[in-house]
């Protein structure tokens, strides 16, 4: 079962980034599956950690492209990434310390930040990368 379905409306027109966004969607769905199927804490911890690491790598990839292709909003976008990563790291620490369970509320939160970010902030560089011939 999936809690998020990839839609081509989310595309930013750059295959490498779209592929990474799809992977992030898949990881949130996997976390949802683990929760729904009542998988143990270890399984959820491992998927959550993969999501955290993949998010870090994804943000790095995007930021690198922004620098290489001279995107003027780089600093602002990077700040948004930092805020999101801080939130994910905080959730992960709470989970690791046993202060939090992975609930639908947590997954809804992750889904909301990911989809909001892809649909709003990431869409803003779409035109810039297209003008630079990135696809
Ligand atoms: Fe796809 Fe700005 O993260």
Image: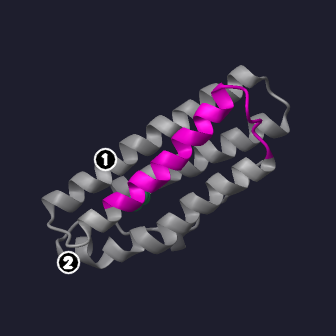
Instruction: Count the labels in the image.
Output: 2
Tell me the tag on residue 131: 2
* Magenta run includes residue 35: no
Confirm whether residue 2 shows in the render. Answer: no
18 lies left or right of 14:
right
Confirm whether residue 85 shows in the render. Answer: yes
Give 23 or 119, whichever is nearer the viewer. Answer: 119
Disc 2 under 8 Å from ligand 1? The reply is no
Q: Mark 1 points at which residue?
A: 60
Badge 2 density bin: few <14, some 14–19, many ≥20, Cα 10 Å: few
Asked if marks 2 and 1 touch (Cβ < 8 Å), the reply is no
Q: Which of marks 2 and 1 is in front?
A: 1
Earlier in the chain: of badge 2 and badge 1, it is 1
Image quadrant, ligand 1: bottom left
The residue that appears at 41% across and 73% down in the rendered structure is 123
The colouring scheme, among rainbow, by chain, secondary structure or one colour, is one colour
Q: What stretch is highlighted in magenta?
A: 78-103
């Amino acid at each position: 079962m999936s809690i998020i379905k990839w839609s081509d409306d989310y595309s930013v027109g750059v295959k490498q980034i779209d592929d990474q966004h799809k992977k992030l969607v898949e990881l949130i769905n996997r976390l949802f599956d683990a929760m729904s199927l009542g998988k143990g804490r270890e399984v959820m911890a491992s998927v959550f950690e993969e999501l955290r690491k993949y998010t870090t790598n994804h943000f790095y990839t995007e930021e690198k492209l922004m620098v290489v292709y001279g995107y003027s909003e780089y600093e602002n976008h990077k700040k948004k990434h930092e805020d999101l990563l801080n939130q994910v790291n905080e959730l992960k620490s709470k989970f690791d310390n046993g202060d939090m369970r992975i609930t639908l509320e947590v997954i809804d939160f992750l889904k909301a930040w990911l989809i909001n970010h892809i649909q709003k902030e990431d869409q803003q560089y779409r035109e810039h990368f297209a003008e630079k011939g990135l696809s």
